[in-house]
Amino acid sequence: MSLPSSVKLFEMAPRDGLQNEPGAIVPTATKIELIERLASAGIKHIEAASFVSPKWVPQMGDAVDVMAGIKRQPGVVYSALTPNLKGLENALTVGVEEVAVFGAASEAFSQKNINCSIAESLTRFEPVLARARDAGVRVRGYVSCVLGCPYEGEIAPAKVAEVAKALYEMGCYEVSLGDTIGVGTPLAAKRMIEATRQQVPIEFLAAHFHDTYGMALANLYAVMEEGVSVIDAATAGLGGCPYAKGASGNVATEDVLYLLEGLGIETGIDLQAVIDTGYWISGELGRKPNSKVALAKGVSG
């Protein structure tokens, strides 16, 4: 297949990027500024917070304050992760218009991460989707470990397709397929998409690839050839899976944008503005951006 003419980029830095940040809690004002900078750069889909127990994910304990504090820009969707009904109800109090639930293609990862089987996790989501539907809120679904698991190793493409189909049929408008530990390679990525698109139309699938082994951009190119036109990425390459040895974080938004620009694929996003934002948030966290493009181009002005 030919490459898509345009790509929807789904920005993950404020949630997936910061949720496992070690050390001190990132200030609420910093999270809000990050989200607003990303929106000003032209990013139209931002996962801004996670309504989970602060006991389990301390960095996301201020989700209500973050969502309430954003100066919302017209045309920008600010979504939040809501793994259970309580999280959804809290999100609804601050006007969230889109939420997300997450499952896994690995039984072992599901047990370790959310203490239940894949089937049980899907059953838990049913009341969440029903309540969201009643509230007029869209739900996005995530599938973790689609190209490998830290406990099970290789994951069968048919298993990924099965979980993605369940989320889609449950009512998720889009299903994001996550290489959580970043072990995938282009051929494996293609095979996974080929299997999954037999169960879920390709226009409802997104790619969420981590860059642990430096393969994320190659894998993204491979799945775009298969028709995928939605990409999850995190500015400055923030994030990583706490269960994955050596996991270096999400693919950097800056690197994805550079690739897409080079391919003539439209995003509507200002690459330099994202680079500048990546340097800013990295400075707030006391490090350099984990983006090759950012390090090569540097900040503007």
Image (cartoon, rainbow, N blue to C red):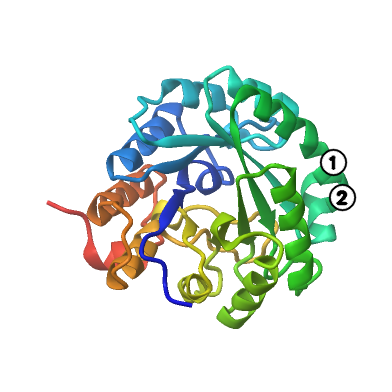
Q: Which amino acid does the dot numbered 1 rest on?
A: Thr
Judged from the image, the secondary structure of the residue bearing numbered disc 2 is helix
In the picture of the structure, the residue carrying the numbered disc 1 is 123
Q: Is residue 253 visible?
A: yes
Residue 73 in the figure: left or right of residue 168: left
Distance from Cα at disc 2 to Cα at disc 1:
6 Å
Residue 38 in the figure: left or right of residue 118: left
Nearer to us in this view, 48 or 214: 48
Nearer to us in this view, 223 or 47: 223
For the residues bearing labels 2 and 1, Cβ distance under 8 angstroms? yes
Residue 104, above or below 192? above
- Farthest residue toward the left? 301
Q: Is residue 117 visible?
A: no
Q: Residue 137: percent from the left, percent from the top?
A: 59, 30
Residue in the picture at 46% in, 74% down: 221
Q: Which amino acid does the dot numbered 2 rest on?
A: Ala
Nearer to us in this view, 181 or 256: 256
Residue 290, above or below 158? above
Residue in the picture at 74% in, 56% down: 165
Q: Which mark is residue 230?
A: none
Count up the numbered dots.
Answer: 2
Judged from the image, the secondary structure of the residue bearing numbered disc 1 is helix
In the picture of the structure, the residue carrying the numbered disc 2 is 119
Residue 54, above or below 108? above
Q: Residue 254: percent from the left, percent from the top?
A: 35, 59
**How many residues crowd around disc 2 within 10 Å: few (fewer than 14), some, or many (20 or more)?**
some
Q: Residue 66: percent from the left, percent from the top?
A: 48, 26
Q: Residue 169: percent from the left, percent from the top?
A: 73, 48
Residue in the picture at 48% in, 57% down: 230
Residue 300 in the figure: left or right of residue 32: left
